[in-house]
Image: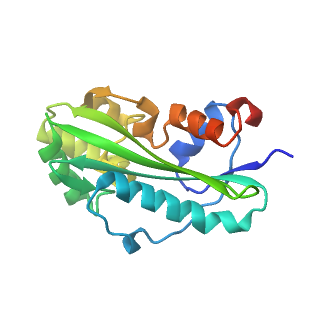
Amino acid sequence: MMPQFVLASASPARRQLLVAAGIQPFVCPSRFDEDQIQLADPAELVQALALSKAETVAPQFSNALVLGCDSLLYFDKQIYGKPESAGDAIARWQKMRGQMGELYTGHVLIDTQNQRQQVRCQVSRVFFAAVSDRQIEAYVASREPLNCAGAFTIDGKGSLFVEKIEGCYTNIIGLSMPLLRQMLGDLGYGVTDFW
């Protein structure tokens, strides 16, 4: 019997990426306290957080593929998650404008029936536009960047303030679809099995 596909995330953007690709996930947010994990290396941090989220949800399912993800922006040798306030988001954008940052997303897929897992990280480079203070303030006032790693989205208003990207586009949204396909293959499944 095919396993159930479970998304251990409350992210509507991740869910929408899966649905658009023909995968109807069962959404089961992990509610894992991310402050428990403190690591200085961005790749290690997103993988550890994604693993913790998936491991929190996996015991609830006997035959499932549980997907956990976590994203952050690495900019100017610092790790940035979601901004703490509107003021924080404005200050970040004033630093990021005209610069390049790296968006890291940790991906974990746990096959609960066969007790196997895949842990990976994808990195995409984001080149931010040299936007004005007025544009930054208007963007933050829209509230869109307040719930996003790095204080921006590429699939909403924030797309207007990104000059270009290098690497996987969907990774910046929060889930690398090409990487997911590879991880499923490594566990012995095909993406079309879930259509």
Residue at (15, 40) in percent of width and height: 134
- On screen, 53 above or below 167? below
Nearest to the observer: residue 118 or residue 82: 118
Above or below, 135 relative to 108? above
Q: Is residue 79 left or right of residue 186?
A: left
Left or right position of 19 against 145: right
Q: Residue at x 16, y 51 (%)?
A: 77
Horizontally, is 5 left or right of 69 in the view?
Answer: right
- Residue 43, percent from left and from top: 35, 51
At 34% across and 31% down in the image, what residue appears?
159
- In front: 167, or 8? 167
> Can I make out residue 109 in this image?
no
> Residue 144: horizontal and vertical position, in percent?
37, 47
Looking at this rendering, what residue extends furthest in the bottom direction?
Answer: 36
Label count reads 0
For residue 172, what is the image quadrant? top left
Question: Which quadrant of the structure image shows residue 80?
Answer: bottom left
State which quarter of the image contains the C terminus: top right
- For the residue pair 141 and 118, the one nearer the viewer reads as 118
Q: Residue at x 24, y 43 (%)?
A: 138
Can I make out residue 130 in this image?
yes
Render colour scheme: rainbow
* Residue 51 screen position, x and y as percent: 51, 60
Q: Is residue 15 left or right of residue 34?
A: right
